[in-house]
Amino acid sequence: MASQRLGLAEESGPNPGESELAVNPFDGLPFSSRYYELLEQRRALPIWASRFIFLEQLESSPGGVVLVSGEPGSGKSTQIPQWCAEFALARGFQEGRVTVTQPHPLAALTLSMRVADEMDLTLGHEVGYSIPQEDCTGPDTLLRFCWDGLLLQEVASTRGTGAWGVLVLDEAQERSVASDLLQGLLRNARLGNLPGDSRVVVVTDPALEPKLQAFWGNPPTVHVPRRPGTCPTPIYRDTVPTDRVEAACQAVIELCMKEAPGDVLVYLPSEEEILLCCESLSREVGPLALRGPPPRVLPLHPGCGPAIQAAYEDTDLGARKVVVTHWLADFSFSLPSIRHVIDSGLELRSVYNPQIRAESQVLRPISKCQAEARRLRARGFPPGSCLCLYPKSLLELEAPLLPTARICEVNLSPVVLLLKRRQIAEPGECHFLDRPAPEALMQALEDLDYLAALDDDGNLSDLGVILSEFPLPPELAKALLASCEFNCVDEMLTLAAMLTAAPGFTHPPLSAEEAALRRALEHTDGDHSSLIQVYEAFIQSGADKAWCQARGLNWAALCQAQKLRGDLLELMQQIELPLSQPAFGSEQNRTDLQKALLSGYFLKVARDTDGTGNYLLLTHKHVAQLSPYCCYRSRRSPTRPPPWVLYHTFSISKDNCLSIVSEIQPQMLVELAPPYFLSNLPPSESRDLLNQLREGMADSSVESESSSTQEFGDACVLQ
Ligand SMILES: Nc1ncnc2c1ncn2[C@@H]1O[C@H](COP(=O)(O)OP(=O)(O)OP(=O)(O)O)[C@@H](O)[C@H]1O
């Protein structure tokens, strides 16, 4: 067996003194005292008892697949990757390194830090991580933690390092799009006998185990014993509070006043509520007459960045920690010091409706599996407490058993593009853990067809292959490609990076001063040009954090945009696409940029039919308004809203809202959208107008063919 051949320090007696001279087999250096300190902690984890059985199963699994099922906090995410690394080391890494996927980039980051520490290795060398816009790996990296979305992109494209000897798909119960898809693709490959002798380890909460067993054809399964300690009986409120944040704050204050020992974990549905709760708690807990130091309030959500690691750290002063979070900490962040859980029982999720091509923010009860995972966070000696800010009936009657598969709730165009790239002609042929609705798949196919990503046989066209190389939604990738033709690559690169990493201007300014500074960054040509202007000003400021703070701009997001822009540029150079010089601000550039944008976003056009700001979407009969943060609404002088606009998102949450909007000319739409798209539009006054324009333009082009081609260039080369 792998571990027997290695003679690791883990296998020697519990007394570190006996194995003082043991050498780390991964770097050949003697283990440090820190290694032994952490080894004691690792040995206390419930999963430690399953180490030999896991390694045995990994060695002997007939299909190369092993399932690991265990409760949150039992040690799966930190220990399984290390054991896989031992397994791969024993085989000389002949099949490749170990890759571990996580559904959240921050979890990949914090886990790699912890595991490098536990293995006594250097982060960025033997242990590394790959998350969007940050690759902390090197040629020596043997164990890589990777955001699953990134691995999926690598596997689909010809670039990157998709190769691995052992692949660990962690947190399968979260049902991220990438995790489900990777499993679907792997199962297909397994059935057709994957070359080499690689291994796949799927790690899950016990709630999803039966489904995964059936999906993978009953692979060997390692059951992790439960964590010791008593789990508190949840206390349910009779009604759902009208003000969740207030109710959660009160519950925290009561716990603090009772001086009940242990840290507190508060679950709220959204990032906005997490921030409100942290602000309110920071104000209110300070003046409380408590025996010890005042509690330390910490937010835990994707926007926190690497600072999230603070949630694991102890303070010297021994202050109680109050961590306020949402679904992010359902499974991925196991904070051992938590004794008390306060759970709102709700989550806010973005759900895509393919019929109207719109995102909505849906507030809904969490699944029973998530509620149980949250309750288990309070397990320990002495038992802690679990307060549910909702009646038990909500859980029993309204909560689904398991988290919803995200693949059933997202826009499927990127997924279908990827499946086509993997030469799965019919996306319906892929083995999905849960099959998305056929209408959603059809809608995605239709959108890709409009984008000219498919050929007449429904396979990827040459253009489709190039689109699939970009880590961007297909319509944005198409706009970027079109910018090569319209000589505005420099501006479109900035826009693609900003739209992906930092959509910007989306929250209300906090003060009049901030509002004035932000207004100065708005561009008269629309929100897209404003985003470019923000980026350019940010670069001119030297990527200055204080500059961003003064304008209420997210510095980390802008830095990400800067990195992504660089990556996109590199990719375009690799594919040998023609680049163009910056020309932002010129009249020609303004038109070029509109053309490039419309080449990708012709599906997202709306028209104000009566000058009142009620926009009718072209592709279906929905009425929408410009977002309050749209530059056309914040202008001081009340001008008429633009009659035709291109929008980035249509959301139907609080109101029917169009965000990131720029004016367009309908003539340009007629020139750039495929004719069969225009003919397929549902009947409306706008469609009639476009058809009239088309006829008029066809007539005039017969008369003066040359002048028309000059004005709009070879507009449809990409179609
Ligand atoms: N980033 C980190 N920093 C410090 N300690 C950590 C970190 N991540 C995990 N740990 C420690 O490792 C222990 C085991 O956590 P681990 O994530 O391996 O459990 P798990 O079974 O995978 O749970 P989950 O499904 O919630 O991720 C935790 O209790 C904690 O003590």
Image (cartoon, rainbow, N blue to C red):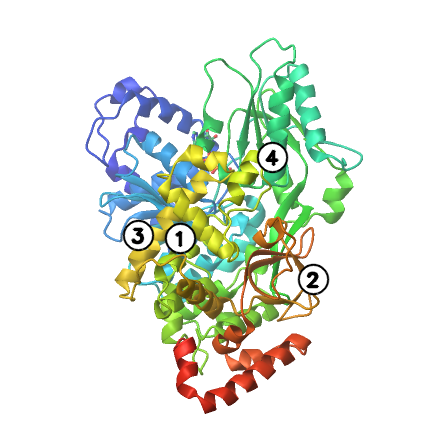
- Name the secondary structure under disc 1: helix
Q: Could you tell me residue 190's position as x and y percent?
A: 39, 63
Give the residue number, with chain letter if any, for mark 2: 614
Give the residue number, with chain letter if any, for mark 4: 274
Give the residue number, with chain letter if any, for mark 1: 150
Please tell me which residue lies in front, 365 or 276: 276
Type of amino acid under label 3:
Gly
Q: Earlier in the sequence, mark 1 or mark 4?
A: 1
Vertical side of 683 occupied by 517: above or below: above
Q: Which of the labelled discs sits on residue 165, or is there none?
A: 3
Q: Earlier in the sequence, mark 3 or mark 1?
A: 1
Figure quadrant of residue 456: bottom left
Task: Name the front one of labels 3 and 1.
Answer: 1
Task: Name the front one of labels 4 and 3.
Answer: 4
Say few, some or many: other residues with alpha carbon within 10 Å of mark 2 (under 14 / 14 to 19 / 20 or more): some
Between marks 4 and 3, how big is the CA–CA gap? Answer: 40 Å
Between marks 3 and 2, how big is the CA–CA gap? Answer: 56 Å
